[in-house]
């Protein structure tokens, strides 16, 4: 059965078996395959020549630019030639080739989801519990699964498979992601956090014997982990900066503005906290969660919720530290460090999931296209009873 999905495969020094893999994909009905030669060695050129003879589109990078850059090149080719005529893009790996039957399953899920008006990212999910799974894939898969759940509240069983089904209306969104290396797939997955995911089982594929993996374990793993933690690192920096500003402003208010006033400490604390919390809100909004809601009402709501959360965090800290000091004794400073660290993580989760949940509307063109998909689906549903009679 012919599939109208477009397959995009970044390739760096692919094995000779890649040609047979492309043939198998074409036999399964995938006539539109785009391979990006990401600066492969000259001895690998025959592989790409054979692909072209098969009818595969090959786009060349003169030099190696990284998996992310290769995927963006493929996505740009898709937008220039296939946008609006396809269910979307399926990304695969040249050196870890999942069975074509699994690709058919991804394509079917991509088609069905959009037919139902859903535009989520289809994620090919490997079984990382099998006996042929490498230690790296097993351990890194477990770490990534935990981090996605802890930091983003997303339950993805295998975000590192490299096998994705991207809806037609979401390809341009993926093109806007800046990373060039293997961390690109992580950034792309994270960009679908508020849109949604559909996980589809695919087979685990290891590297063929003698194949040179383009993935470099240590540097690429570090980049992937940094991509995951980047938002939390920036959040930590902004929080620490706001705390330092709070102390500085308290000193200024206490020693200058309210000097000699019996209520100097209280007034200074309140004024300093209002200023530091305002700065913290703006930094968190723009640099941590990139909250860009078009709704003024939603922006006001997020600001109010942020200040309420800040106040509750202070109250909870004071009450919990006092209670634990009475029950357990010990150093109040030590207890406060533990309590405030815990509240720090809790506050991040609340801000991430509830306060800075972007309510931006889709752009008018995307809204129009989504409406057309919904109308087409409705017409198909209405026609089915007549066909079944």
Image (spheres, rainbow, N blue to C red):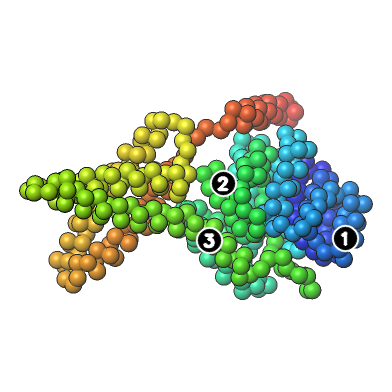
Would you name the residue on which mark 1 appears? 45
**320 or 299, which is in the foreground?**
299
**168 or 387, which is in the foreground?**
168
132 relative to 208 in the view: left or right: left
Mark 3 vs mark 2: which is more N-terminal? 2
Would you name the residue on which mark 3 appears? 226
Res 163 → quadrant: bottom right
**154 or 238, which is in the foreground?**
238
321 relative to 198 in the view: left or right: left
Name the spot of residue 93 as percent of width and height, x first. Answer: 73, 58
Name the spot of residue 88 as percent of width and height, x first. Answer: 71, 42
**189 or 138, which is in the foreground?**
189
Dot 3 alpha-carbon crowd within 10 angstroms: few under 14, some 14 to 19, many 20 or more: some
Would you name the residue on which mark 2 appears? 192
Name the spot of residue 223 as percent of width and height, x first. Answer: 58, 62
Q: Residue at x 80, y 64 (%)?
A: 13
Query: Can residue 28 be seen at all in this image of the molecule?
Result: no
- Alpha-carbon span between mark 3 and mark 1: 34 Å
Say what secondary structure mark 3 lies in.
Answer: helix
Residue 357: image tag: none
């Amino acid at each position: 059965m012919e599939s109208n999905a477009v397959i995009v495969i970044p390739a760096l020094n692919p094995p000779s078996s890649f040609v047979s893999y492309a043939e198998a994909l074409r036999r399964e009905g995938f006539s539109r395959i785009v391979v990006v030669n990401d600066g492969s060695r000259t001895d690998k050129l025959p592989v790409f020549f054979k692909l072209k003879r098969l009818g595969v589109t090959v786009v060349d990078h003169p030099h190696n630019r990284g998996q992310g850059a290769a995927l963006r090149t493929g996505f740009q080719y898709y937008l220039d030639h296939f946008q609006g005529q396809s269910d979307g893009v399926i990304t695969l790996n040249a050196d870890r080739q999942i069975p074509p039957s699994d690709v058919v399953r991804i394509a079917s899920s991509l088609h069905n989801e959009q037919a139902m008006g859903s535009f989520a990212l289809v994620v090919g999910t490997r079984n990382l519990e099998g006996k042929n799974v490498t230690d790296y894939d097993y351990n890194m898969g477990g770490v990534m699964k935990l981090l996605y759940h802890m930091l983003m509240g997303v339950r993805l069983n295998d975000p590192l498979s490299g096998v994705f089904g991207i809806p037609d209306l979401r390809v341009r969104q993926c093109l806007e992601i800046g990373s060039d290396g293997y961390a690109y797939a992580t950034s792309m997955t994270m960009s679908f956090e508020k849109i949604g995911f559909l996980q589809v089982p695919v087979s685990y594929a290891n590297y063929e014997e003698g194949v040179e993996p383009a993935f470099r374990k240590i540097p690429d793993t570090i980049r992937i982990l940094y991509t995951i933690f980047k938002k939390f690192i920036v959040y930590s920096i902004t929080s620490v900066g706001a705390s330092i500003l709070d102390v500085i402003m308290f000193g200024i208010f206490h020693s200058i503005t309210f000097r000699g006033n019996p209520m100097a400490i209280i007034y200074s604390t309140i004024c300093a906290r209002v200023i530091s919390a305002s700065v913290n809100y703006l930094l968190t909004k723009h640099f941590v969660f990139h909250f860009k809601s078009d709704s003024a009402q939603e922006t006001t709501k997020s600001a109010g919720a942020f200040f309420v959360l800040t106040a509750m965090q202070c109250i909870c800290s004071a009450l919990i530290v006092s209670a634990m000091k009475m029950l357990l004794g010990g150093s109040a400073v030590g207890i406060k460090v533990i309590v405030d660290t815990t509240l720090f993580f809790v506050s991040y989760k609340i801000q991430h999931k509830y306060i800075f949940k972007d309510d931006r509307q889709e752009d008018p063109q995307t809204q129009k296209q989504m409406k057309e998909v919904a109308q087409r689906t409705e017409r198909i549903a209405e026609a089915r009873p007549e066909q079944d009679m």
